[in-house]
Amino acid sequence: MATTHIKRSSSSSRLVNYAEKRAVQKDGHNLDIDYAKSEFKQVREIYGNKGSTQAYASRVAFSPKEFDPKNTEDQIKALEIAKEIYSTAYPNQQVALYVHNDTDSLHVHAVIGAIDLQTGKKMHGNWQQYREKLVKITDKVVKNRGLEVTIPKPRPEKLSMAEIKMKERGQPTWKDKIRQAVDSTMREAHIIDFKSFKSKLREKSVDVFERGKELTYKLTGTNYKVRGSKLGDDYKKETIFNGLDRKHELQVGRSGQRKGSAWLEGRGERVEQDLQARRNLAKRAERLQRESLEATQRLARERKTSLKKSQERGLGGPSL
């Protein structure tokens, strides 16, 4: 069986550095694996796509019952399966793949470039949808390969006796109130950063605190507080921050379109400026070359005239 996950990263180079030095096998999709870092950078520069997210880190792990981490043939097979999974999930994006065998479970790390090579835009979507899509493709590929499909075990939410009774009466619990406040806040188009997210939740009597890799929610004026991971995947820090980043990038894109053209506002403007600078430099070089040639010709004429006059004068006497 195979399990997989995905999360965003602000540095593709950092992901490659980590995965490459431990790799026993490697391959790439839409890039040369030996130049992964430079090719990720080239695509970002070509498309001029700003934003904090450069890449996505993912991993697919295989059961020790089906793959031996120390077996070279199993390593190559795992790499082939991973490449099929990620090329199917991200056909128009760069993906660097690295096989690791440093645990009991043979696994493949994937570094996924955020930019679509056809559109020049970053991948957008709900964080939970990213994972669900990848899991579905993984299950389909491993099933076609004759491997066991992973069946996730749902974790039941722990409820207090008071919460259980409220559920039985059909009343929302304090955790449900927090979920409802977060859901309604994330649906508002103008909420595009953590500051506005926090401010809006405060209006709905919910305080939110960023603590390391977690978000903690608290009903204002009470002692009721809970970590986002306890409320569900949609309320985790990574999910919220990715949702806010996506909305921010979408809004920036719309703003550029309203001003005229996203192309001219972004990459197109920088390319045009670069081309103009090159044209100006070429004109300047041409002018300097022309002036240098004219100066050389003028000097040659002056020397020729001077030499002729000297010949006409002879040694100081009149010319014969």
Image: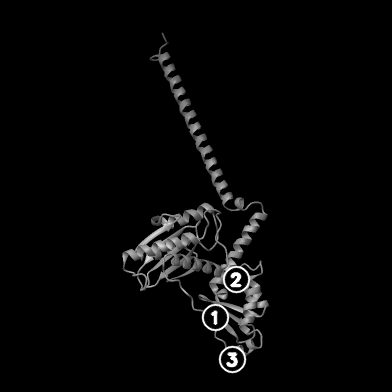
Q: Look at the picture and state if 171 lies above or below 133.
A: below
Where is residue 17 drawn, in percent x and y? Answer: 40, 63
Q: Nearer the viewer, mark 3 or mark 1?
A: 3
Which label was assigned to residue 194? 2
Q: Residues within 10 Å of mark 2 (few under 14, many from 20)?
A: some
Pick whichever, 270 or 277, lies toward us.
270
Q: Quadrant of residue 15?
A: bottom left
Q: Nearer the viewer, mark 1 or mark 2?
A: 1
Q: Are the residues tagged 3 and 2 within 8 Å (C-beta)?
A: no
Describe residue 159's horizontal placement relative to residue 189 as left or right. left
Which label was assigned to residue 317? none
User: Which sits earlier in the primary sequence, circle 3 or circle 2?
Assistant: 3
Q: Is residue 62 visible?
A: yes
Q: Residues within 10 Å of mark 1 (few under 14, many from 20)?
A: few
Describe residue 206's horizontal placement relative to residue 291 as left or right. right
Alpha carbon distance from label 3 to label 1: 17 Å
Question: Label 1 amino acid?
Answer: Lys
Where is residue 162 drawn, in percent x and y? Answer: 61, 90
Q: Image quadrant for the C terminus?
A: top left
Q: Residues within 10 Å of mark 3 (few under 14, many from 20)?
A: few
Where is residue 97 drawn, in percent x and y? Answer: 41, 62
At mark 2, the secondary structure is helix
User: Which sits earlier in the primary sequence, circle 3 or circle 1?
Assistant: 3
Which label was assigned to residue 230? 1
Where is residue 73 drawn, in percent x and y? Answer: 33, 64
Question: Label 3 amino acid?
Answer: Met
